[in-house]
Image: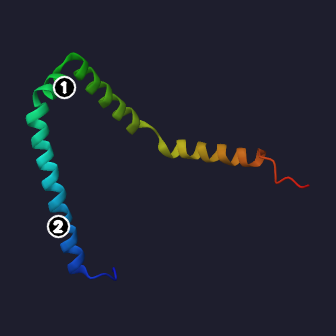
Amino acid sequence: MLDIPLVRFTIAFFAGRLVEYTLAATFATLASHSYGALIRATIMSPWGVALQLLLIGLLVAIGRIDWVRVAQAAERRRAKDARRAPGPRRR
């Protein structure tokens, strides 16, 4: 399907993943040791719980939007604006 050397591509892909995941795990461990108690306290506070519930509600609301209808309305507005826009000026 692709005209690339598959073996080299696969080796590069997995080498990149190995480096990325190693760095991510290292930084996550460092952050956990440094900020773990602060993060736990913040997440479990009443404001943290309220924010989490608000964000979950926002996620549900975004999922319920009819995006096809929104895109069609935006397209109609663009077409209407294009018809109203003045043409090029002549001197």
In which quadrant is the N terminus drawn? bottom left
Task: Report the front residue among 25 and 82.
Answer: 25
Count of numbered circles in the view: 2
Which residue carries the number 2 mark? 15
Disc 1 residue type (three-letter): Ile
Q: Which mark is residue 87?
A: none
Judge by depth and name the residue closer to the eye, 86 or 16: 16
**Helix, strand or loop status at disc 2:** helix
For the C terminus, which image quadrant?
bottom right
Residue 45: quarter of image: top left
Q: CA distance from mark 1 to mark 2?
A: 35 Å
Q: Position of residue 72 (x, y in %)?
A: 58, 46
Q: Position of residue 11 (x, y in %)?
A: 18, 73
Asked whether the beta carbons under mark 1 and mark 2 sit within 8 Å of each other, the answer is no
User: Residue at (69%, 48%) from the top-left corner?
Assistant: 79
Residue 37 horizontal/vertical position (percent): 10, 27
Q: Secondary structure at mark 1?
A: helix
Q: Nearer the viewer, residue 16 or 55?
A: 16
Write the residue at 11% across / 48% down.
Answer: 26
- Residue drawn at the location 31% of the way across and 81% of the way down: 4
Location of residue 76 (image quadrant): top right
Q: Amino acid at mark 2?
A: Ala
Q: Is 65 rendered above or below residue 82?
A: above
| Mark whose residue sits in front, 1 or 2 | 2
Tell me which numbered mark, 1 or 2, is placed earlier along the sequence.
2
Residue 11 vs residue 80: left or right? left
Q: Which residue is mark 1?
A: 43
